[in-house]
Amino acid sequence: MINCIIVDNKSDAEQLKSLVARCPALNLVGKFNNPSDALNHLANQNGTDLAFIDFNTAGQTGFDRINKLDNPPSIIAISSDGKFAYKAFDYDCIDYLIKPVTHSRFFRAVDKTIRLSSRSGPAISHDKEIFVRKDTALLKMNVKDIAYVEALENYIILNTTDRKFTLHFTMKGIETQLPSDLFLRIHRSFIVNKQLIKTIDESSIKLDLGTNLKTIPIGKSFRSVILNDICVMNK
């Protein structure tokens, strides 16, 4: 079951609500006409998986604020025309719906969401070799050699113990491509190699990079995920 919210003006939100009600895979947990109310809900509830958001209602500021949450939901963007489609790509939206939203188009977007969320197994094995661009050359590296990934506006930085590579990619995109048994998202801006974790405290972890320890912050909404992912032995 996918928990979802709707952020749209009052009349259009009702139409979306009726479409959600006709989809057994969706569970509506909130309907908002004000993006600030939606943001407060998302900031205080960890169980929202998907948000249907109207660009005209939320505005670019609303999208910016939602994407800055520690654990933002997947987004299906909605608008009365196609002028925000490129911007929706920047926000890594799953799909872009143009009003009036038809039954068939809505369900295509939901089906796409389900397919993306139900991917089983790692997309890349530990020993998989990939090529990343460094200046004008392509360098070969092993996925398991990635120490951590850091978000930098519209780019990501792949960090090994001694090198870094800047790529035009999104955090959500790279997260789906890395094996989940080896890598862990601990912050909206950081994914780490679990094999390199040295210590975990209340607000940060330390990665053993060989010559030094790298301190990386833990997002508040990610702490429970981290503790559920590791084996903790108490006295």
Image: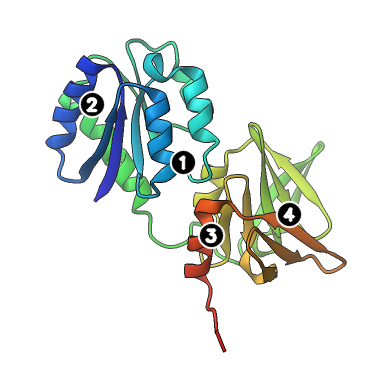
The answer to which of marks 2 and 4 sits earlier in the sequence is 2
Q: Amino acid at mark 4?
A: Lys
Q: Nearer the viewer, mark 1 or mark 2?
A: 1
The answer to which of marks 1 and 2 sits earlier in the sequence is 1
Query: Label 1: few (<14), some or many (≥20) within 10 Å?
Result: many
Q: Amino acid at mark 2?
A: Arg
Cα separation, mark 1 vs mark 2, equals 24 Å
The residue depicted at 23 percent of the width and 17 percent of the height is: 10
Q: Nearer the viewer, mark 3 or mark 2?
A: 3
* Residue marked by disc 1: 72
The residue depicted at 58 percent of the width and 55 percent of the height is: 186
* Residue 91 visible, this angle: no
In the rendered structure, are the residues bearing label 1 and label 3 in contact, judged by CB atoms less than 8 Å apart? no
In the rendered structure, are the residues bearing label 2 and label 4 in contact, judged by CB atoms less than 8 Å apart? no
Cα separation, mark 2 vs mark 4, equals 41 Å
- Mark number, residue 140: 4
Tell me where residue 178 appears, x and y as whole percent. Answer: 55, 56
Cα separation, mark 3 vs mark 4, equals 33 Å
Cα separation, mark 3 vs mark 2, equals 37 Å
Q: Is residue 147 left or right of residue 55?
A: right
* Residue marked by disc 3: 223
* Residue marked by disc 2: 105
Q: Secondary structure at mark 4?
A: strand
The answer to which of marks 1 and 4 sits earlier in the sequence is 1
Q: Secondary structure at mark 2?
A: helix
Q: Nearer the viewer, mark 3 or mark 4?
A: 3
Tell me if residue 88 comes above or below residue 5 in the rendering.
above
Tell me where residue 217 appears, x and y as whole percent. Answer: 67, 53
Q: Amino acid at mark 3?
A: Arg
Tell me where residue 162 appears, x and y as whole percent. Answer: 84, 58
